[in-house]
Image: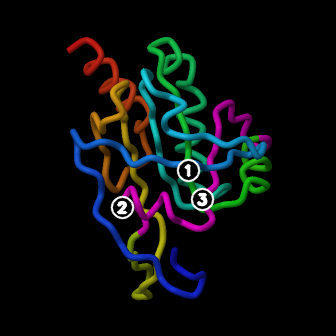
Amino acid sequence: MAKQSEPLAVSELVEIGRKAPAFSLKDQDGKTHRLRDYAGNWVVLYFYPKDQTSGCTKEACQFRDHLPDFRSVDAVVLGVSPDSPDSHTRFREKEGLTFDLLADPDKGVLAKYGVWQEKSMYGRKYMGVVRTTYLIGPDGRVAHRWDKVKVPAHAAAVLAKLKELREG
C-alpha cells in the first residue's frame, strides 16, 4: 500500500467487457458498500472531483432527478469522490440527494478505475479525478463507460444507454 506521501500510480481506465474492480468504501453515514453487494443489479458508478462545486452539483442533481427512472429499471446510482463522509453528508443534505455518495480519501478505488489522473488548469499540473461514469452490468462487468464526462444531459444519456442494454 502506498504511503500518504507517495503519489498513487496512474492506472488505465477499465475497458468495456472487463470485470469491474472490487471496492469497499464508506458512504455518508459510515455504511460500507462493496461492489459484490450489488451482484445481479445494474450499477451506475460515477466518479466526480469534489462535493459542492458547480459541475459536480449539477451532475449529482441530474442523477437525483432521474433516480426514480433508474430505480424503475433496477439500477443503483453511486457517486464516488475523494471527499470525506462528512463532506458527503453536507452535500446530500444541501442538494436533497437521495442516493449514496462513497468516500475514497485514500484514492485507491479512484486509481483502480483509472480516474485519478494528471490534470492541468491554467498551465498548472496536478492530480485529480477525471469525471467518468461506469455502467456495470448484473454480471459485474463494465457494460459501458463515459470518459471526461460533460455534465449537461449526462444522467439522461446514462439512463438511455442502460435501457438500450437491458432491452438488447
What amino acid is at disc 1? Answer: Val
Under circle 2, the secondary element is: loop
Q: Is residue 105 left or right of residue 109?
A: right
Q: Position of residue 113 (x, y in %)?
A: 39, 56
Q: Check the image and name the residue furthest to the front.
A: 1
Q: Position of residue 35 (x, y in %)?
A: 49, 38
Under circle 3, the secondary element is: loop
Q: Is residue 115 magenta?
A: yes
Query: Label 3, on which residue?
Result: 104
Between 75 and 61, the one nearer to me in the picture: 75
Picture disc at residue 114 = 2
| Span shown in magenta | 93-116
3D distance between C-alphas at marks 1 and 2: 13 Å
State the residue at coordinates (26%, 21%).
165
Between 148 and 19, the one nearer to me in the picture: 19
Between 156 and 127, the one nearer to me in the picture: 127
3D distance between C-alphas at marks 1 and 3: 7 Å
State the residue at coordinates (44%, 79%).
121
State the residue at coordinates (39%, 71%).
117
Under circle 1, the secondary element is: strand
